[in-house]
Image (tube, grey):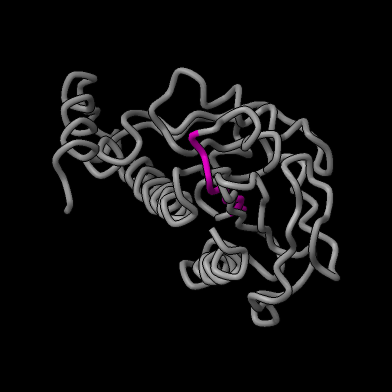
């Protein structure tokens, strides 16, 4: 894939974060990996979303070393690269501090599967991993470990926020959007009463239909 095209896709997907109310100010980031070259395009650090452009996206190698770009890459770059190295099926990673999902993270609680939409997209609960400081590879390692054994394309990390992955950058952003939407629904339902669970058998059927039948 040509890097100019990937820069445009990553820039466009970063703009989906404020558009879907998943970020505040400069928080959050989107990256994509080119499976042909293993190069990663990621949002620059500390730049407001209004000031982003395809040209100021930063290109790094799979170990996080800058290959192209005049700005510093996201402070989460090392963790994105850990995920890409561990998951060859993943070509897009998204990180947000979206409000409802992060509220569950602050409590160290997984987001339970109470909606058919969540059964479709996540095939069960959205797991919650432990705590790690920002800036190194530890967060990426936690994401990889937390997602093991789950169908979910996203997880939350304690006191931090959401990490979502996908076979494409668009799929990763979709997972981040759906994570927040379902976290909000679950939170509101829990304030109103006791949510009615969906049986594991029906969750499995929902997820299979969505991944094998739904769409074009």
Residue 59 is left or right of residue 149, and the answer is: right
Quadrant of residue 83 within the rendered picture: top right
Q: Is residue 59 above or below residue 5?
A: above
Q: Position of residue 78 (x, y in %)?
A: 77, 42
70 left or right of 117 in image = right
At x 54% / y 32%, what residue is drawn? Answer: 88
* Left or right position of 24 against 179: right
Q: Is residue 115 above or below residue 33?
A: above
Say whether residue 130 is magenta. Answer: no
Q: Is residue 133 above or below residue 205?
A: below
Whether residue 202 can be seen here? yes
**For the magenta stretch, what is the residue range?**
89-97
How many numbered marks have been drawn onto this rendered protein structure?
0
Q: Residue at x 19, y 36 (%)?
A: 212
Toward the bottom, the furthest residue is: 50
Residue 97 coordinates in the image, percent (x, y): 62, 53
- Along the line of sight, the residue nearer the viewer: 96 or 197: 96
Residue 20, given in percent of the width and then of the height, sits at: 46, 67
Residue 207: % across, % down:
24, 33
**Residue drawn at point x = 16 percent, y = 35 percent:** 209
Given residues 37 and 123, the one toward you in this image is: 37
Residue at 16%, 27% in the rendered image: 205
The image quarter in which residue 138 lies: top right
* Relative side of 3 to 78, left or right: left
Q: Is residue 102 visible?
A: no
In depth, the one of 36 and 26 nearer the eye is: 36
């Amino acid at each position: 894939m040509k890097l100019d095209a990937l820069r445009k896709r990553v820039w466009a997907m970063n703009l989906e974060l404020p558009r879907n109310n998943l970020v505040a100010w400069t928080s959050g980031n989107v990256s994509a990996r080119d499976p042909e070259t293993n190069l990663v395009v990621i949002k620059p650090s500390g730049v407001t979303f209004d000031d982003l452009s395809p040209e100021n996206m930063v290109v790094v190698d799979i170990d996080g070393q800058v290959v192209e770009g005049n700005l510093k890459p996201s402070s989460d770059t090392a963790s994105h690269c850990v995920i890409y190295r561990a998951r060859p099926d993943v070509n897009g990673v998204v990180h947000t501090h979206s409000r409802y999902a992060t509220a569950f993270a602050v409590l160290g609680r997984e987001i339970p599967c109470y909606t058919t939409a969540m059964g479709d997209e996540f095939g069960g609960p959205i797991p919650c991993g432990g705590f790690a400081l920002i800036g190194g590879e530890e967060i990426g390692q936690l994401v990889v470990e937390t997602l093991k054994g789950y169908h979910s394309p996203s997880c939350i990390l304690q006191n931090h926020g959401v990490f979502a992955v996908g076979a494409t950058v668009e799929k990763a952003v979709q997972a981040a959007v759906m994570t927040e939407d379902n976290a909000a629904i679950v939170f509101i339902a829990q304030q109103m009463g006791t949510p009615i669970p969906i049986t594991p058998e029906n969750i499995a059927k929902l997820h299979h239909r969505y991944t094998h039948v739904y769409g074009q």
